[in-house]
Image (cartoon, helix red, strand yellow):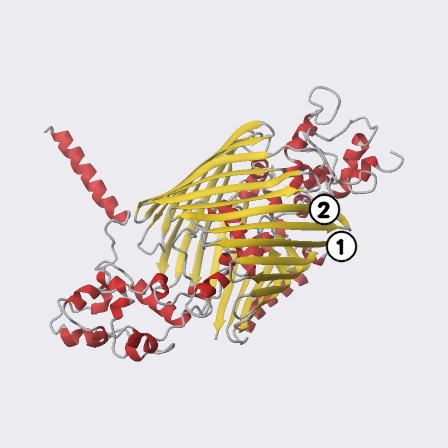
Amino acid sequence: MRPWIKALALLVALTLAACAGVLGFHPTDPSRPFPHRAHVDKGVNCVVCHAGVEHAGDTGPLHLPTEAVCRSCHTKPHDERACLGCHGEASTREGAEIARKNLRFDHTKHVPVAHGDCVRCHSAVADAKAGTILPKMASCFSCHEHKDQWKMRDCDGCHVDLTAEDTLPTSHLIHDGDWIREHGVRAGSERDLCASCHTERSCAKCHGAGTTPTLPAKMAFDEVSLPGLHRAGFRSRHAEEARADPGLCTTCHSENSCVDCHTASHVSPAGTTRSPHPVGWVGSGRGGSEHGVQARIDPVSCAGCHGGAGEMLCVGCHRVGGAGGSPHGPGFTSTKNKVHDMPCRLCHGPGL
Amino acid sequence: MVCKRVARSRSPAQWVVVVLAVGASTWSSRASADPLRLRADALTDTQSETQSPTGLVVLQGQDKVRPWLDAEGLVWAGTKPGLTGDVLVLALHLREPHGYGEARVGRFVVATGAIFPVQMDGADVLGRTTWGGSVELFGGVPVVPRFGPRAYDWVTGARVAQKVASRLTMGVSYVQRREYGEISNEEVGADLAAAPAKWLDLAAKGAYDLTSPGIADGRLSAATRIDAFRLELFASEQSPGRLLPATSLFSVLGDFPSEMIGGTVRWKAAPRLDVLASGAGQLVGGELGMNAWIRSTLRLDDRGLGSVGVEVRRVDVISARWTGFRAVGAQPLGHGFRLSSEIEIAVPDQPNGRGSVWPWGLAALGWRSHAGWEVAAAMEAASTPEYRYELNALARISRSLELR
């Protein structure tokens, strides 16, 4: 093999080895899942380490083993550092603390039913690589059907507070992908499910009528990995974003939002003689109908500045008999009374 | 273009907000209930959009007095330019203990079925049956920001839904909204969520405008997961003219729908590396366009406390054509400190005198204590279509508290 090929192969191998660490193939954290299975295989009963757990009620300590408990058997440890510093992950302990705080669970009622067989619920003990051995909810349902509670979304029987429990969905509900776009269609049918974790303010922060100050992108400016429609330089590109998806803005904003904000930030053409539209935007010559084409494609943008009293600008030309002709495009129909109802009466009203 | 950022002296109103911020943080540590969750945020920035320098206080609280009774509030106060504020949520939530029904009263957002989210002052009642059916009725007055009064406005609606074997939920809904007594929105809608197989999730909803008959909004999503991949196909059709209130003159221009069809792929390429890509074709006003982006996030540790990410985006839809690049990074520094930064460069195809490149950047330092305090400060710099360059300083202090 040629020397340069050897060097290249070595370089690639070294790069991959380095990247393996960065990419997480070789975790740098020395802690690892506690070897529950190894202890069970050796015949160590669960309560030897978790002393008193069989009498634990709905509250109280976690009954996790102390260093002294480990050393009562492991009299000659291979390392002077604390056993549980490496044997057992911090996230597992945190998960157990959260579960203790937010789940209604009483070991004293369950241990006799299971005849002292902890593995019946804590089945993950059999998996030597399992980080947490907290039973999955499916384990609970193997005995407790809870069909009615499930249908009724009555979670309070077991879950003290799902929001505080911070149990992220793991199945189809996981907020993955482009969730900001996707959540609307998912939440439409599943309001009950969303409400299991989310409260009123989750919706109101973005969908409220006057939301700007509470937008997560504004308040959590230092959480740069948070997704959001209004992140980073949105203010610069908001016109482009609005044009690229006509109608999207109206999901949260009223038609007056544009003019309100532009006026407040002194970038509104209102009150000036300068028009933001290109030459020939309105008129009878070539390109004179461009404003009509654009208005049909993106009427929300027009309403942003010309809504309310500004509509009379259009009425001046487009009212019945006016020089601008009918503004109704192909396919327009309405159930409104054109003489009496708004906005029809502006152009079709009595005497017009 | 010129730089236009002039610091102004604080008005009395701004001082009131500052005092409110400090007071809210102190007050939250003395309040008590069982269990009570409170959060107070005070934010200030020097951006002229909110009349620099400004202050903003947001108070959010949630209380479960009894298992069947919740109360929740989210209010803010700020200077924009004078002392102002608003209530986003102020609601009581009552539940029948066995889940047969629940009711909300106060100010909240109704987002159910195919109905567009609407914030209102009113009531919402939901009844459930043991065979999976539910009926929801709501009615009230649509919220006008800053307590703006408007006579003869109201919104009423309903949704009837049925769940089948935990795998299918279907619903039909109706909403009518009036402004000054005139119908501004009247729609019927249908929605569906289904999980026919463990690997497949479907969701769809559509709203049909009754005032100007036609589809106002339709959406479809189908998602599947295969090992490290999640694939979603989506489609939507919106009629912007029908999304405007029917009292607006711009709602009478005709049916020019905006249609989109595309897909999103998420790939967990490595334990710490995620790649997310999305692409969609669009038909707007009869003209074809596209919107695509790819984003990659690398976590710097196993718990994801530090991360770096890059994103590239291209939008090419009618007159909105631009390319964007964004990069983010965050790294914990120990003792609760965290450094984060974000940059974005947007390049419009047609600058039209607004500058050929719009760069934006932010560097932030945050600190979080175990006692629930959070402090963050940042500097933001940008060159925008309005200003050749601008600097903005931001600071936030927050306090979260949970009492049982």
Question: Residue B69's quadrant in the figure?
Answer: bottom right
B270 is higher (above) or lower (below) than A148? above
The image shows residue A329 at horizontal and vertical percentages of 70, 29
The image shows residue A137 at horizontal and vertical percentages of 37, 63
Q: Is residue A307 left or right of residue A92?
A: right
Of label 1 and label 2, which has the lower sequence position? 1
- Return the residue found at the far top: A286
Give, as a three-letter code, the residue at label 1. Answer: Arg
Question: Residue B141's quadrant in the figure?
Answer: bottom right
Q: Is residue B312 visible?
A: no
B14 is higher (above) or lower (below) than B382? below
Question: Residue B274's quadrant in the figure?
Answer: top left
Q: Is residue B347 left or right of residue B247?
A: left
Assign the C terminus of chain A to one quadrant of the image.
top right
Nearest to the observer: residue B333 or residue A130:
A130
* Other-residue count near label 1 (Cα within 10 Å), few / some / many at <14 / 14–19 / ≥20: few
Q: Which mark is residue B378?
A: none
Same-chain status of marks 1 and 2: yes
Q: Residue at x 32, y 64 (%)?
A: A135
Q: Which mark is residue B150?
A: 1
Q: Is residue A307 left or right of residue B195?
A: right
The image shows residue B18 at horizontal and vertical percentages of 60, 64
User: Comparing marks 1 and 2, which lies closer to the viewer?
Assistant: 2
Q: Which residue is mark 2?
A: B184
